[in-house]
Amino acid sequence: MRYFVIIVLALFCSLSVAQDSKLAENYMDQGEYNKALKIYQKIYNLNKRNPRSVFALVEVYQQLEQYQSADSLINEAISLTSRKEQFLIEKGYNAKLQGKDSIANSYYKEAIKTIDSLPQLTYSIAYRFEQRNELDAAIESYEKGMAINDKLNYNFQLAKLYGEQGNLEKMFEKNIELIEGNPVYRPRAQALFSQYVTDDAENESNKILRKVLILRLRDNPDPIYNQLLSWLFVQQKDFMKAFIQEKAIYKRDETNMDNIQDLVLTAIDENDIEAADEILDYMIGETQSITVKYLAQVLKIQLKADTATGEQYAAIRQEYENLLQAYGIGKETFRLQLDYANFLAFKTNEAQKATDLLVALEKTDLSKFQKADVKMLLADILVLQEQFNRALIFYSQIQNDLPNDLRSQESQFKVARTSYYQGDFPWSLTQLKVLRSATSKLIANDAMELSLIIADHSLEDTTFVALKAFAKAELKQYQNKRSEAITLYDQLLLDHKGDPIEDEALLKQAQLYEVEGRFEKARDNYQLIIDNYQDGILADDAYYNLGLLYQEKLMELDKAKQLFEKIIFSHADSIHFVDARRRYRRLRGDENEKAF
């Protein structure tokens, strides 16, 4: 019974101390140091040998600038223990707060000297220095401990401290040493590097990491350095340079193209079609895997279809047919068939042939996700045919079948877009507001863009006259009825000249002109936006699209470079900023075939 009572009392005291500590911490956070002082004094008197109690009370004294009291407390703590190194650090720090740097340094040196005989105390000493933001002393402690005992490894702590110091070269080097010791550490190191590296190749941190890696690679052609360089170039969106590194890795054993495959998917996501094309050509030409070759060919033709003009459609259609003949029509070629159906419906106006292909595909042994993809495209084709109610049923079924999948959010967006095409703008806007916080950034951006179009052009025009005309033209554009859409945009621009929707109409029409191969007309539209809507939200789109037009179709590279430069210096918040900068540098000659 006696022991039971003792245990209960001990537990009660422990809980009481914990509650008091929490209360004191709250007072410290609020700057009420005198209230915290009384509590910490009480806790300290209960157990004067507890370092945490000592340090907490010292901290309050220092905040109150009662340095003498702090010094006396530290002296008492030193007298009660044989392990005085951490209290020496605190004594030095207390002196430093009073401007007595030479005295502080003498205490720090005495604490660090302990490591000579007791290297196992390295971490506790260095960590105390870290807590007091004495980074030089912490680094010295770690380095000394490692020098004395080669079994100690504090490279991770040192790398972190070098980073906090701003000594990036040493920070990178230490992390690379950790990777050299254990490649499993690479993702952790890259996570740390990403705090310093940006998408700008001229950023100082990027240049330092590149230099460190290149020097190591020259001394030792270890693929780990190629991997890190590839990672760095991907952060910079320099996919051509990343590809050079991945090729160097692949050529060592020529067995695994997984990294190259990941790289091309990233390049496509980032809209670097030039790099993606080159990588895909390499994959098709070099791989011994039928699966990899098939995937590369599917991606290659999809890129062609996405960027093709009308006169190229026949050749692309034939290429799809050739691939299907080569690989067969079955579950294994699901993605190829889906892409081909999309091409037929939205590019060559063969909606019925696309539907027949999808209906046949749906009858194969598909997963529920693949079935949803088929149903999504069937619904898109129904919108194409203006069978809106049937399309809405399909979209709703996808949301019910896969409520937690991104396809559900995509179908919800398409419900809103279908309502928009029908002229039901208030309901469409209600749907879009929910999607602004969608998990998918692409869906969230699309939802934001469409909701802004509706909101911006319905404030003053409650009858939606101009917006209805614009939505009707957009529907024709969606249906790939390019001539009709161009005519509707012409009429809208004539009927609503000076209306805020004018720049939207000019941009949409310009995109149609490009597909039609009428590049001069597209150029004129983009230029009108630049000339008349310099401060509008579509100005950066006009600069970027016109730059692409000059670079890829009109072959006026100097003009393209000037337009990309305009985005870099005048539209730094544009979604096109990174790609515009990449293209500008390539046109300027910064990007070449050298690995670095």
Image (cartoon, grey):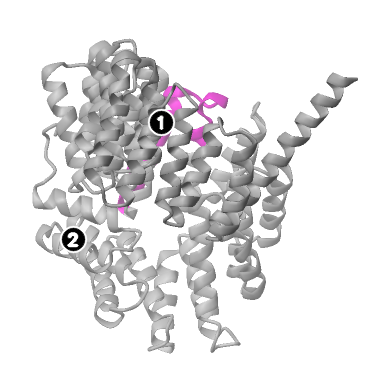
Q: Residue at x 64, y 45 (%)?
A: 42
Neighbor class of circle 1 (other Cα within 10 Å; few <14, some 14-19, many 20+) is many
529, above or below 9, in the image: below
Image quarter (top left, top right, bottom left or bottom right) of the C terminus? top left
Secondary structure under the numbered disc 1 in the rendered image:
helix
- Principal secondary structure, stretch drawn in magenta: helix
Q: Nearer the viewer, residue 177 or 446?
A: 177
> Label 1: which residue?
86
Q: Position of residue 476 (x, y in %)?
A: 49, 66
> How far apart are the alpha carbons under marks 1 and 2?
67 Å
Q: Nearer the viewer, residue 595 or 458?
A: 595
95, above or below 179, in the image: below
Q: Position of residue 443 (x, y in %)?
A: 52, 54
Q: Residue at x 31, y 41 (%)?
A: 164
Q: Is residue 186 visible?
A: yes
Neighbor class of circle 2 (other Cα within 10 Å; few <14, some 14-19, many 20+) is many
Q: Please report the bounds of the magenta region as a residue range.
A: 311-337
Q: Nearer the viewer, residue 183 or 326?
A: 183
Q: Residue at x 24, y 56 (%)?
A: 580
Residue 363 falls within the magenta-colored stretch: no
Residue 327 falls within the magenta-colored stretch: yes
What label sits on residue 550 in the rendered view? 2
